[in-house]
Image (tube, grey):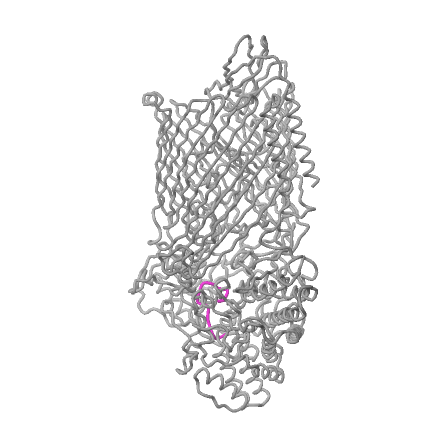
Amino acid sequence: MKPINTLLLAGLVSVFSACNVLDQLPQAEVAESIAVTNKKGANAALAGLYNQLQDGNYYGRNFQLISDVASDISQSVGTWDFYREMDTYVTAPANRENAALWTRGYRAINIANTLIANVPNLADLTTAEKNALLGQAYFLRGLVYFDLTRVYAGVPDVVGTLGIPIVLTPSKTVDETLYPSRPTLKASYDQVESDLIKSLELLPEAYASDITTRAQAVKGTAKALLSRLYLYLKQPAKVLQYANEVIADPKYVLQTSYESIFSGKFTAESIFELNFGSTDQSGMRNWYFPSSLGGRGDIAIHESFYQELIANPKDVRGKMVARDNTVNVYYSTKYQKAGNIDNAHIIRIAEIYLNRAEARAQSGDLPGALADLNKIRNRAGVESLTVTGVQPTLEAIWQERKLELAFEGHRFFDLVRTNQALTKLVQVSRKNGPPVTLSNVGRQIFPIPLADIDSNKKLVQNDGYK
Amino acid sequence: MAAVYIMRQTSLLIFLLCLSTMSLFGQTRTLTGNVTNSEDGTDLPGVNVVLKGTSTGVTTDASGAFKLAVPNQGGTLLFSSIGFQAQEVVIGNLSKVTIKLLPDTKQLSEVIITGYGTQAQKTLTGSIASVSGKSIENIPAPSSDQLLQGRAAGVQVSANSGTPGGGMQVRVRGTTSINGSSDPLYVVDGIPIQSNNLSGIGLGGSTTNPIADINPADIASMEILKDASATAIYGARAANGVVLITTKRGANKKAKISFGTYQGTQQLWRRPAVVDGPTFETLINEANVNNGQRPTYANPAGTTNSNWSERIFQDGALRNYDLSIAGGSEKVQYLVSANNFFQEAVVKGSDFKRTSGRVNLDFTPIDKVKVGTSVLFARSTRNLIRSDDNISGALSGAFFLPPNLPFYQADGSYTKFGTFENPIAAVENNNIKMNTNRFLANVYAQYDILPGLNLRSTFSLDYSNIQEDLYDNTFLNNGASRNGFGQSLNSRDNNWIQENVLTYQRSFGDHSINALVGTSMQESTFERTTATGEQFPSNDFTRIISAAVQRGTSEGTSWGISSLFGRIVYDYKSRYLATVNVRRDGSSRFGRDNRWGTFPSVAVGWLLSEESFMKDMSFLNVLKIRGSYGLTGNQSGITNFQSIGLWGGNLDDLGAPSGSSAYVDLPGTAPIQLANQDLKWETTTQTNVGLDLGIIKNRVKITADYYVKNTTDLLLAVPVPRTSGFNTLVQNYGAVQNKGFELGINADILKGDDRKIGWNVNFNIATNTNKLTKLAAPFTVYNRDIYRYEEGYSMYSFYLHEQTGVNPETGAPIWTDVNGDGKFDANVDRKIVGNANPKFFGGITNTLNFKGFDLMFFFQYSSGNKQLHWNRFFGEHGGTRNTNFMTSQLDRWQKSGDQTMIPKMSAENYAGNLRPSRFLEDGSYMRLKNISLGYTLPKPLLDKIHLSNLRIYVSGQNVLTFTKYTGLDPEMTGTASTNLTQGIEFFTMPQPKVYMAGLNVSF
């Protein structure tokens, strides 16, 4: 009987040794309750927040491409017909790219909210470290609310009356706070303003490394974005105030070579430049470049805009285009680094000069406006312009913004902000179809994504998409 | 912990019980013997041998042998076995007895393998379909689940694509879960095995199939457990049915060596229907004119004409070799086998190779103790290509690239176009390999405590090590932008299972009882290490060590399950039958308070044909009615830590994991999951009623079943407003109902033997109706939201713009105005226009034999299912894209009065936001899945050449297909990487037509 007893003993041992199979712990993740409870956790969450902005759904390509195709800069020539919908003003509420931007924006807001809720209570942080963390969280939340408001809600006195849902607490589990309704458009802009003002109080002037100072938010970044915000809110005095402060800041210098801003990284031109690398790749080159160069070539420059870019042979900005001879279209070479490591230029000093030029023109300082405008023109190799009258000056500034800031996510929102969308986006010719016109007033903004209309009964769809 | 405690107590009890029964045997002598079937002389295992009037007895082993302690003098032995007439033998002074049992023709004699046991089909109360190894042998298929197709009523099998060794979709009685898995549980020789796709390289919708590691030639039988009574013994993982795969074992016979081989070739059934160069340019010009633009091309007739698809397809080779030796002695029985299988795809660059070895061993080292093992080692090697729901592959390039472009540029480089790969570049430069090493083994020890009472303990290991290497050189788009791109992944999946089962079988007069209790514990861990390289010195360097930019990552996860189960099968006078099952399962995936679930089932049956009032009906051999009701659970398809709020890496826009959260070199985290502490088991309640009928000397057997499956507390990813920063939260919300009817008929129309003609027909048909009975809010899935999940509709419902025609005057499409506001608006006038579920499906097999010849033909069919021809959506673009046209575009409206479904080619009629229903086609088909003709040499001749068997055959697969569907293949899913989609063709590799010849020889 002995061998049998041994066998049974072996059986018993195997049964009892295995009782803990039900206690398993995650290896690649951590529980929400301990994620942001110390300095390391808070810094990691902040990096995670910048990473949201970098995503292909946002500044990794989507935000810039939406602005490009919805305006008179670029067209969708590929199979990814979500951009074709935007290009031809038939964007469906279910449009995937439209929903992706919204989703990504609110992911970022949720991380910012977590930092704003948790950082004040963390024991192992100095006040200066807390302020830097909180300042960045407020700045980034302000930036995201600004972008989402521009895309989905509108611009005061131009289009839209409802804002976008404002969420200010971290989401942990499903409860009523997860089902917000839409406030007024004004309330949305108020939130942007208060977040940016708050961040300005908290942020440092600079970080130890110059790259970090441009890759993350500092006081100058907040001021620069405020100068843009007040253009939307039509408060030229405040635009002037913040633009003056930024231009006076010695950190930010207009580069002599326009091309070097894009071929290099973190030049003195940059106020806020999202860093990309081989682990965090940008989609801009991929979506513009033809497949013979390893891109997908879905987006191409409108023939009409190409003609504007090359109209002046001295204009260096007209040199940063190339032709795809297989599909017979032009594409931008602003983003051309192998490995798709081109940075995203969110705010650079040239924009601040143009912001100030516009504010100066609106407040009657036409010579000052022209001085700023020509600074930008001259840098691009183009001769100075002389115009008279407020409106012609403004129009010259707007045209300059189009050339200077093309493919950087400005044009469509500038057109709407300046109330030119319905007059400029007329009979824009396309390669794969008849010319398109934006005639529906309500389609100067994008639809609230269908996923949220379906899941949150409190949300009201924009009029242009009902 | 309470349950663990109970389990400990139970196990202890079991073992104490064993210990106390060990010294019951006194002064005796030993009698040995052998039991065979009088009809065919085969050994009969499992025969009860009892010393009459005592409790002393044994059951025969796999070779029909037994050994029993008997008194020195006197005594009578009683031999009984289900399906055979009982027989008594006076022992006298015999020391060895040989008994031939006569089959009981009144009974259904087959013994069916059930979970943790076997049972005579006659007394079975559950619904179990059985597929014998015989019926699937010599059919070329990399994986055995594919062989279930069309052979068992209610089991719906579809290949995700024609990729060799690719994933299969198997649904037993419909799809029960939305986000959870609806795949059945696979149990091989008693071990629940790992059956998920473990490939880490995202190549498209195609998945790889771990069941392909098992050699079909090793399979003795496959049983599909369908109703709650049959499946509940597997409790928490049984809601989607259970597939039991039993491999062949040795017997107490002299060694038999068998060798089998087949060789074949495979061809494409249909080619991509795209237009040629001149037609392409003519159509583009027509669209330009319709749009008020200038024609693009000056001279369409004289343009280049490149037929891209002719460069990517091939006749695929197919080879298989099997070698086995089986036999044994009284103490030891063995089966050792080896297999080599190779299959090429019909698209160049893709193939599958399996080399495997098996050792199945049973031996009796000590009286009453049996020890054994089943060991499989398999190495599967795949060359993979980008295909199936992937627009960067050769197949998509063949559809998309304009035919007016040359294959190569003037400088000899590949012509590139848009986001697509040049198909020639794709097949010539493809370098993606996947090697799987699978070790699947169990060891068991069985102790016969008393006659009819035994304890069996099993320890099993299922280990897979998967190495994947990908290299995209600079001729490929993906490599061009990064100056070469390489990836190397190593994945390890490790499962161990320990089970103990105490079985008791006994008859008392008219009462017969078969009971078992058991414990089971399983732990599963998964780890993956990934290295990525970019910027290679040249295309000759393919290993990441040469890359200028190198990155690495690793990940890991684990889960565990712990169970207690029991079953009692009871019958009275072999007439009134009852089965009760209960299983209690605990899973690590749920919160501490919701870990444990209890899954009971009951079944009753009545064998009317045994009643005296039925005895006069001589034509009626068997008539049984049966019914069952029970609960089963599901915990698969959710992540291992679904109930906890988590932070970790990044998510993509749809909520799927997408890399790290780092901001370049700063390590980052982000929220990835909302907490739901209330998460618990998904439960399926199934009711089944069935009828078994055997008439005309059991030559015609009919089985019919009706079932209703209600799945509640669905593990559903309920959409939450994305303003929360999340897409979904997995909640127990929602319900799905599946109900259906199954009918199987097996008829020996002519009962033949060597001399006479034999003809057997096996037919099955099943219906299944799937309905979402409760859902929080409707939601849409897949690109362009083409599937919609909405309460009251079926799963896999297509959400499109319903196109009813084309205006013969204007050529504009006519759309259904869904909201009835008098105008069509693409944003709101979209509706569900059909679904991918068949109305009925099944198969019919005819087997004929005559004078050593055998002919088999097997048709498989599916009817009423819609298939979305998504290639057409892209290829019938009306000039709104630069890409090639499918030939269906030629039927466009051109002039007033044209009657067609294809609108006039203009940007408006083909606008980017339209999802026309004209691409939703009837996916019904009937396919001659298999036909084979063989010849077996006659016995006298075989004896002369010292062979025990020799058969040669020719065979074909997918030889004929009848369908209205216009795509490459009606029988495929295409997007198997998600459970939520079915019935879509999107650059999916079609299934090939196969012609082959083979040989089986044994000696």
Is residue B688 among the parts visible in the rendering? Answer: no
Where residue B508 appears, as percent x and y from the top left, is 65, 19
Where residue B460 appears, as percent x and y from the top left, is 54, 36
Where residue A332 appears, as percent x and y from the top left, is 43, 72
Q: How many marks?
A: 0
Image height of A151 relative to B616, above or below:
below
The part of the image, by quadrant, that contains residue B81 is top right
Image height of A30 relative to B595, above or below:
below
| Residue for point 49% across, 19% down | B36
- Between A22 and B581, the one lying in front of the other is A22
Q: Is residue B131 left or right of residue A363?
A: left
- Between A262 and B755, the one lying in front of the other is A262
Q: Which residues are magenta?
A: A71-84
- Location of the N terminus of chain B by quadrant is top right
- Location of the C terminus of chain B by quadrant is top left
The part of the image, by quadrant, that contains residue B436 is top left
Image height of A442 relative to B9, above or below:
below
| Residue for point 66% across, 54% down | B675
Where residue B634 appears, as percent x and y from the top left, is 61, 44
Q: Is residue A231 left or right of residue B532?
A: right
Is residue A465 among the parts visible in the rendering? Answer: yes
The reply to whether the magenta stretch includes residue A73 is yes
The reply to whether the magenta stretch includes residue B767 is no
